Image (cartoon, helix red, strand yellow):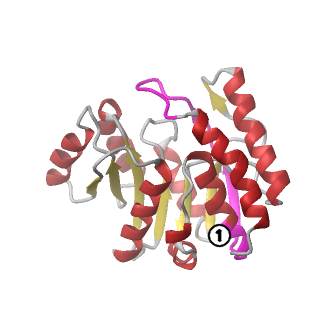
Amino acid sequence: MNKTLVIVPTYNERSNIETLFARIFEAKADVDVLIIDDNSTDKTYELVEEMSVKDNRIHLLVRPRKMGLGSAYIRGFKYALKQGYDYIIEMDADLSHDPADIPRLLQACQENDLVIGSRYTDGVHIVNWPLRRLFLSYGASYYARVITGMRIKDPTGGFKCFKAKVLRSINLDKIHAEGYSFQIEMNYKAWKKGFKIKEIPIVFTDRTLGQSKMTLGIIVEAIFMVWRLKFSKQK
């Protein structure tokens, strides 16, 4: 029987976490969820630990400090491969990604190797973003496509499903990017290795609780990352 792990990095997401678990398990009861918490000051990890005692589908890894989104996912990928999961899903903790879409990602991944929940397939499907944020995201996606040559409309999206064989084929110790650029780099590696990639449309709803983790440093990193990928000889 195929095993699925949903990886969710957290930092100060206590106000969202119980709702997130409820909605994930309502959408797909037979998945496990791994929370990777960067020592949240609001003690998100304490609430997750309490819930994990009552529900063996919930797992927790706590890191000593804020260490970035990309490294959190890499930690989660290694955990998933070691534990023998067949499908690995990335998603945000802030409910901007709708857990109801998890079955759609998994269904599409039956015939594909990487499935991306796309905000820009068949138009733009984003709720509550200011226009400048939309221009930034859409522009970054277009920029990444042009420079790298990837035919992916939403290369910076963070709601996706990998087959385990994709992650096993990538040298995860060589992935050091964070934020937007982490998503671009993982997509690029999968694309260069010839894996079958599919985008399915999702509606992205900006967070209503907590604060955005977007920073200028993440944007700058993504600008230079695509050029490094373009000229890299490593797949």
How many neighbours does mark 1 have within 10 angstroms: few (below 14), some (14-19), or many (20 or more)? some
- Give the residue type that dot 1 points to: Asn
| Residue 128 appears anywhere in the view | yes
On screen, residue 35 above or below 189: above
Quarter of the picture holding the N terminus:
bottom left
Quadrant of the image occupied by residue 50: top left
Q: Residue at x 67, y 47 (%)?
A: 222
In the rendering, at what x and y percent does residue 36 appear? 34, 52
- Reading the image, the residue beneath label 1 is 112
On screen, residue 154 above or below 88: above
Quadrant of the image occupied by residue 190: bottom right
**Residue 198 within the segment the image draws in magenta:** yes
On screen, residue 41 above or below 227: above
In-image side of 181 versus 35 (left or right): right
The residue range painted magenta reads 189-213
Q: Residue at x 42, y 41 (%)?
A: 93
Quarter of the picture holding the C terminus:
bottom right
In the rendering, at what x and y percent does residue 139 appear? 78, 37
**Residue 163 within the segment the image draws in magenta:** no
Helix, strand or loop at label 1? It is: loop
